[in-house]
Image (cartoon, rainbow, N blue to C red):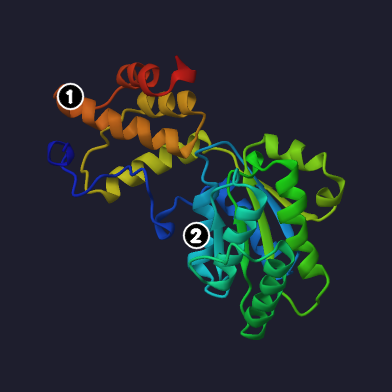
Amino acid sequence: MYQEYWGLSKKPFSYRTAATELYPSHALRAASLRLQYCFRNDAGATLLIGLSGVGKSSVLRKMAAEDLNLRPFAHVVYPTLPCAELQRVVAAEILEKTSVDHNDSADTVLLRLRQALRGHAAEGRHPVIVFDEAHLLNDDALNQVVLPLLSVADMDATLSCTVVLAGQPSLAAHIARNAQLRDRIAVTATMDGFTLSETIDYIQASVKAAGAEQSIFTADAIKAIWRLSAGNPRCVNRLCDMALLVGYADQLSEVTASEIESLAAEILPAAA
């Protein structure tokens, strides 16, 4: 809608970014390194902690895209399902099937999971099971779904599998209260937002890559974006995208801090 006005060939700020186009922030690189260590050393379980929008799912997608041996890459996004259903969702992903028979008992499902993991190991594959929004997993889910998965791998040295619990900061305290699971966590990766310098570089590079010949965002505007978003990549993208739209609607020659302040009060309630 606003691309032509600003001389852009595409939208520079997307709500969904391809894994190959993620900005290599310090937080992303540090988290990737810790996750990679866990995968390569078959460390069993890892925590990926960060506020919503900092890029937890993005870093996982990036690693899955870069390493084809991390298969199957099961991304479980229904943490509040009943335990039996949650276990079947995991099993279906690892078995690479659309579903698992609802008549199968928990023991039967675990047995099938173990057999499938053996098959993947024999083919040189390293399955990864990601529980997204893991801070929403209740104690029953942790004890009846997550722990049994780790125990299956522990009982057979030929198996290769990593469980990633990805969630908001409250997840760390949640896991700390579960002694059995806490002792299984080999690595904890924490993700934060962009630094100011990263925010400057990210915005300028994104606009340039989209074909802009001018800077569009003033220096004060970028500082306001960083301050009001706390460097959260999702919030940065939302502010920048809406600022370009408002700038087009108001026929501005550039986006200033004033526009960012007004938008933040509208789309970032916490900043109001």
**In the rendered image, the vertical position of residue 104 relative to residue 188, given as above or below:** below
Q: Residue furthest top?
A: 272
Are there few (<14), some (14-19), or many (20+) residues within 10 Å of tag 2?
some
Are there few (<14), some (14-19), or many (20+) residues within 10 Å of tag 1?
some
**In the rendered image, the vertical position of residue 143 relative to residue 251, given as above or below:** below
Q: Which residue is mark 2?
A: 62
* Residue 220 horizontal side relative to residue 141, left or right: left
Element class at badge 2: helix
Q: Residue at x 61, y 85 (%)?
A: 123
Q: CA distance from mark 2 to mark 1?
A: 36 Å
The answer to which image quadrant residue 116 occupies is bottom right
Number of numbered labels in the structure image: 2
Residue 252's tag is 1
Disc 1 marks a residue whose amino acid type is Leu
Disc 2 marks a residue whose amino acid type is Lys
**In the rendered image, the vertical position of residue 219 relative to residue 80, given as above or below:** above
Foreground mark, 2 or 1?
2
Q: Residue at x 60, y 56 (%)?
A: 130
Q: Which part of the image, by quadrant, shows the C terminus?
A: top left
* Nearer to me, 252 or 218: 252
The answer to which image quadrant residue 261 occupies is top left
Element class at badge 1: loop
Q: Earlier in the sequence, mark 2 or mark 1?
A: 2
Residue 51's tag is none
Q: Position of residue 36 (x, y in %)?
A: 64, 63
* Residue 89 horizontal side relative to residue 108, left or right: left
* Nearer to me, 236 or 141: 141
* Nearer to me, 102 or 158: 102
Q: Position of residue 112 (x, y in %)?
A: 67, 73
Q: Position of residue 166 (x, y in %)?
A: 62, 48
